[in-house]
């Protein structure tokens, strides 16, 4: 058991992300809920995870599926009540699982009482909780664009002012330069810590110190000052784990964020690796070049070793399913899902599993009417307007929409994959008859048990936690091989990223090494399609 009161326990931990809307419904309304999550805790305990990162469950009009909060201290009624949250925290803890909540601190919903008050008058104390500029209709302060399309400025005629929003107009940005705003947020965080929450994922935290007049959103000049204050004022217990979402992070920046003195955060989610297979915008995918991925991983592994800490992930609620993206969701679905896991779990850092990843869940293909995600729908409309062909835009959606990750969790081969007895809020992937948790649990060769074994290995061998990384054959375009070593132990991970056999020669230093895990039965002189192996030896 990890001692979660101690700083740094999360270096030995594995987390599991739950997107509550799509995880498990308990009352037949077609939406996942907190009692549903509680009913699946045994499953997560069996997998071996130490914590759950819970995507937002707070009160929200759901313009962006809960990333638009209207009351930070209440639960969205379809998800349950505060008492349900208390029970979840308790029941999870009983199984050695911590609850990590999602903190959306960059913006609120336009239905938050602060924003409603701000709209009433320039003199209301809450007015300065948001970012306003005077102006005339039709001439926004500048040409900044919102992430979900359109101008980043929205006009309010009654006030003769524009407010700033980096995301949808219904997600007004908070003004972090106002100390009262920061104080409110710290108090709210303490509210959840006092209820037993053991950590936080901080939504778009690199964007809070914005300076729109200078067109600065990410990495504003006061960012680290704010994060240090946040850490000091709100994350007081040494055991609290904090992970910041930082699309703008590079290695140097991440070193500051995750400095081992604990002055900022435990770690950040960085996205360099996950953006390698796109040409400019994420909607324009290009094939992944393995050599680039290897170089990127090398840079992060060596760049943070001993001076920071990595988070390890290939999936989340904003990304398409990695097995469809970098693996093969047809013939080699099982092999490639396991291979990608082995590649990731051999690395230094804290792994995050996104719900269904442990089953090898895949992308979905729907007609455009089937999509819900605000980003997807806005992009679709915008590209059509710009003259793209509908079939091309739909191909982008199929490859890249965030809704690929948001299909209901596939529990059984029964109705609605066992997710709900009602009408699911979003389409269930039709492959649930084959891909579901019940089938995985009944098959000792399943992806689920492969993850379970990887998690157990990481806990058993210290070298997974602290071994120094070295990349082998950087120019090999088909095989990703690397070693990790500490004073006493050594690992070698070898992954074939292709559906073809690849030659393989065990490095001399690993002669006689033990195979800790492999996604194929029996030995083979070459690497089979998507084969992965992790070797271990004492030094
Ligand atoms: C983050 C979330 C994403 C959300 C956005 C705005 O990127 O992960 O789902 O839409 O922030 O809050």
Image (cartoon, helix red, strand yellow):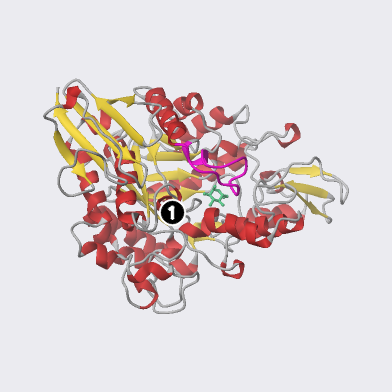
Seen in the image, is 207 located left or right of residue 516?
Answer: right
Where is residue 11 shown, x and y percent of the image? 30, 35
Furthest toward the left, the residue is 512
**Nearer to us in this view, 440 or 393:** 393
Q: Position of residue 529 (x, y in %)?
A: 31, 47
Decide: is 476 above or below 531.
above
Report if residue 288 lies within the magenta region. yes
Q: Residue at x 62, y 40 (%)?
A: 280
Viewer-closest of 352 and 173: 352
Q: Nearer the viewer, residue 174 or 524?
A: 524
Q: Residue at x 28, y 56 (%)?
A: 92
- Identify the residue position indicated by label 1 in the image: 324
The crowding category of the residue bearing disc 1, from other C-alpha atoms within 10 Å (few below 14, some 14 to 19, many at least 20), is many
Q: Residue at x 47, y 32 (%)?
A: 292
Question: Can you give x and y, in whole percent of width and height, for residue 327 in the image?
Answer: 39, 49
Q: Position of residue 76 (x, y in %)?
A: 50, 64
In the image, farthest residue toward the top: 487
Q: Is residue 400 magenta?
A: no
Q: Describe the element under mark 1 as helix, strand or loop.
A: helix
Can residue 450 be seen?
yes
Q: Is residue 248 left or right of residue 450?
A: right
Q: Is residue 3 visible?
A: no
Quarter occupied by the C terminus:
top left
Name the residue: 24% across, 45% down: 455
Q: Which stretch appears magenta?
A: 273-289
Quadrant, the N terminus: top left
In the figure, residue 221 lies in which quadrant?
A: top right
User: Residue 20 is drawn in which quadrant?
Assistant: bottom left
């Amino acid at each position: 058991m990890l001692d979660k009161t101690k700083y740094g326990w999360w270096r030995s931990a594995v987390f599991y992300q739950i997107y509550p809307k799509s995880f498990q419904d308990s009352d037949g309304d077609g939406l996942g809920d907190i009692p549903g999550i509680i009913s699946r805790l045994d499953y997560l305990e069996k997998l071996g995870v130490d914590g759950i990162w819970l995507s937002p469950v707070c009160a929200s009009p759901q313009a962006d599926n809960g990333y638009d909060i209207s009351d930070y201290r209440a639960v969205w009624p379809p998800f349950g009540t505060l008492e349900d949250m208390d029970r979840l925290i308790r029941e999870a803890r009983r199984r050695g699982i911590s609850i990590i909540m999602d903190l959306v601190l960059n913006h609120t919903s336009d239905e938050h009482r602060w924003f409603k008050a701000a709209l009433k008058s320039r003199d209301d104390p809450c007015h300065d909780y948001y970012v306003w500029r005077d102006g005339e209709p039709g001439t926004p302060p500048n040409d900044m664009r919102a992430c979900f399309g359109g101008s980043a400025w929205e006009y309010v005629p009654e006030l003769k002012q524009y407010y700033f929003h980096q995301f949808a107009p219904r997600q007004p940005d908070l003004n972090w330069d106002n100390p009262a705003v920061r104080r409110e947020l710290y108090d709210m965080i303490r509210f959840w810590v006092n209820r037993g929450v053991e950590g936080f994922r901080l939504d778009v935290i690199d964007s809070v110190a914005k300076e729109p007049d200078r067109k600065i959103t990410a990495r504003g000049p006061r960012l680290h000052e704010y994060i240090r204050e946040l850490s000091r004022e709100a994350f007081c217990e040494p055991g609290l784990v904090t992970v910041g979402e930082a699309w703008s992070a590079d290695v140097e920046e991440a070193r500051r964020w995750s400095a081992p003195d604990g002055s900022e955060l435990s770690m950040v989610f960085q996205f360099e690796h996950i953006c390698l297979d796109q040409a400019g915008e994420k909607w324009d995918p290009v094939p992944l070049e393995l050599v680039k991925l290897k170089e990127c991983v090398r840079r992060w592994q060596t760049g943070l070793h001993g001076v920071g800490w990595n988070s390890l992930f290939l999936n989340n609620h904003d990304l398409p399913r990695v097995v469809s993206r970098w693996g093969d969701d047809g013939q080699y679905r099982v092999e490639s899902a396991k291979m990608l896991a082995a590649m990731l779990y051999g690395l230094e850092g804290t792994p995050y599993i996104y719900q269904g990843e442990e089953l090898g869940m895949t992308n979905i293909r729907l007609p455009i009417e089937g999509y819900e995600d605000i980003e997807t729908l806005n992009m679709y409309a915008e590209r059509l307007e710009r003259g793209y062909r509908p079939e091309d835009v739909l191909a982008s959606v199929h490859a890249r929409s965030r809704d690929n990750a948001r299909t209901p969790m596939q529990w059984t081969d029964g109705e609605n994959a066992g997710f709900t007895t009602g009408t699911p809020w979003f389409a269930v992937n039709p492959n649930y008859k084959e891909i579901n948790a019940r089938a995985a649990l009944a098959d000792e060769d399943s992806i689920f048990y492969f993850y379970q074994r990887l998690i157990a290995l990481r806990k058993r061998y210290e070298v997974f936690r602290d071994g120094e990384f070295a990349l082998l054959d950087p120019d090999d375009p088909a095989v990703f091989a690397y070693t990790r070593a500490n004073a006493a132990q050594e690992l070698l991970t070898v992954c074939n990223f292709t559906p073809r056999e690849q030659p393989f020669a065990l490095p001399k230093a690993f002669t006689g090494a033990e195979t800790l895990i492999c996604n194929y039965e029996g030995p083979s002189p070459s690497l089979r399609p998507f084969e992965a192996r992790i070797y271990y030896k004492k030094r």
